[in-house]
Amino acid sequence: MLSRVVARIGRQVTARSRSFKPLQVATLSSDSAQSATDQTDSDWTTKWTDATSSLRSDVSFDESAARLRELIQTDLLRFTDLQHNPARFFEAHRILARHAVQHGPGFWIRFTVQYNLFAGTILAVGGDDQVRSLDDMQSDAQLGCFGLTEKLAGVQSGLVVNTTINWDNEKQKFILNTPNEGARKNWISQGAVCDKAVVLADLSVEGKRCGPHAFVMDFRQEGSVVDGIHLEDMGRKTTGNDLDNAWIHFNNVELPKDAMLNRYADVVDGKYVQKVKGVRPFDMIGQRLYTGRIAVAQAALSYCHQLFDVTKNYSDNKQCYSMSGDVYLSNIPQLNALYIEADEKLSELNAFVDRCETELSECLVSSTLPSAQLVEAIATCKVMAVEHSIRLCHLLKQEVGSFALMEDSGFKHLDFLQCCKFAEGDSRILMQKMARDALKEFTVAGGVSDGSDESELCAQITSSMAAEIAVSGDKQKAWDANWRNIYALAEVRMENTLGQIMA
């Protein structure tokens, strides 16, 4: 049974004879979908497209940062639009992603860090005064970074925070520290040019750990980095060198009391107070991961589609030798089949991502947490969009010969998809979470297979792990030994999720 399941996963979509077509936004039938799309009108789209049409990647990160400041001051997209006009927020991301084929991922990443991770976190967990401060930041075109990932707690470790922040009741200040080199904030986009930062740190009050919380802080004052902050550029990258990425170390940096983003928790009279029962600040910070996952999925699909579009335009006009008359590269069977497959798969995934965007937009507007089903759907759309884009673009590169080597073909920025793979939750980590959820549900339901692909895999993994644990007593070893089946289970789970959402 397992071999049949894995074989089914590996099969490609059956090709039908039709040409590769421009990507279309899915049409949704629900009233909520219509209300979300109504907020983004063609006039705004034209203005945003025009405002971003001259973006370049052959610039320093200081010049790129200056370009973002200019874009912020056009006021076309407000920092608060993530909540008040999410359709416009997502559309802005989609339009910027179209530049990635020619210019790489640098500006798109800079933009989403600014609007989603930095401003979006303040919007999600900041108090009223902190949210209102976003207007002043926008007026002053202040740039921000988002300090989450760390050297020894990166994208493949899950969501781990070792940076510490302690409340000093005598000073009435928070003291921010990097306890060791492994806790340095790592790969922080816009970290070398930002004016402010949202930093995730493990909070302690009265000697008691309260878990990870978000703090907004001045990173520079009058152009100079605040005392106690040390940073350095991460170095040259394969693409996106118009974007600065820094490691950051904090040494007894003092933050005022109002630095703590305090909508859901605060320090009151020297004591930690959870202001909304049952809602942890970290849960709401996770909302930024959800919006980011949708934006990343859209960006990957946009890049993939445009790369196919550019390549097909070339292959349609590239004549090949043939004894039977004019033959063009696009007529080669394997390339034509790939165009057909990409057309089908990208259309399917775009519709899926679009549906997830619509459902999440309702949560953003109402400031409510998405359901567990929607959270898994968003993770699924992120993984599937990115992984299929990587697969399709790799296959395309193998079929178009020397064209893929040309600087203006777009293939040199393929590592944009590598950025998408680990951004907002590494694909492997998300897939393991899906597999764990499936195994937990299987166990709760009695641990007996019902004959479905998912339950068959759950049964085999459960049995195999039990046998390994009986011998070694090591649960992690048992999990690792079943890694192929675990990822196969995640693949089946994702296919099922897509089917349920699009039903």
Image: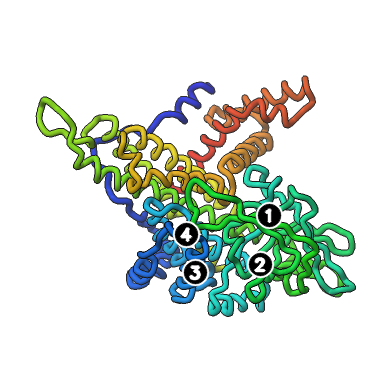
**Where is residue 168, by image quadrant?**
bottom right
- Sequence-wise, which precedes: disc 1 or disc 2? 2
How far apart marks 1 and 2 lie (CA) works out to 21 Å
As shown in the figure, which amino acid type bears the numbered disc 1? Lys
**Where is residue 131, by image quadrant?**
bottom right
Residue 192 lies, in percent from the top left, at 60, 61
- Sequence-wise, which precedes: disc 4 or disc 2? 4
Look at the numbered disc 3 and give the secondary structure of its residue. Answer: helix
Look at the numbered disc 2 and give the secondary structure of its residue. Answer: helix
**Where is residue 389, by image quadrant?**
top left
- Name the residue nearer the viewer: 431 or 148: 148
How far apart marks 2 and 3 lie (CA) works out to 28 Å
How far apart marks 4 and 2 lie (CA) works out to 26 Å
Task: Select label 4 or label 3 by which is in front.
Answer: 3
How far apart marks 1 and 4 lie (CA) works out to 21 Å
**Marks 1 and 4 close (CB-CB < 8 Å):** no
As shown in the figure, which amino acid type bears the numbered disc 2? Val
Task: Select label 4 or label 2 by which is in front.
Answer: 4
- Name the residue nearer the viewer: 260 or 462: 260
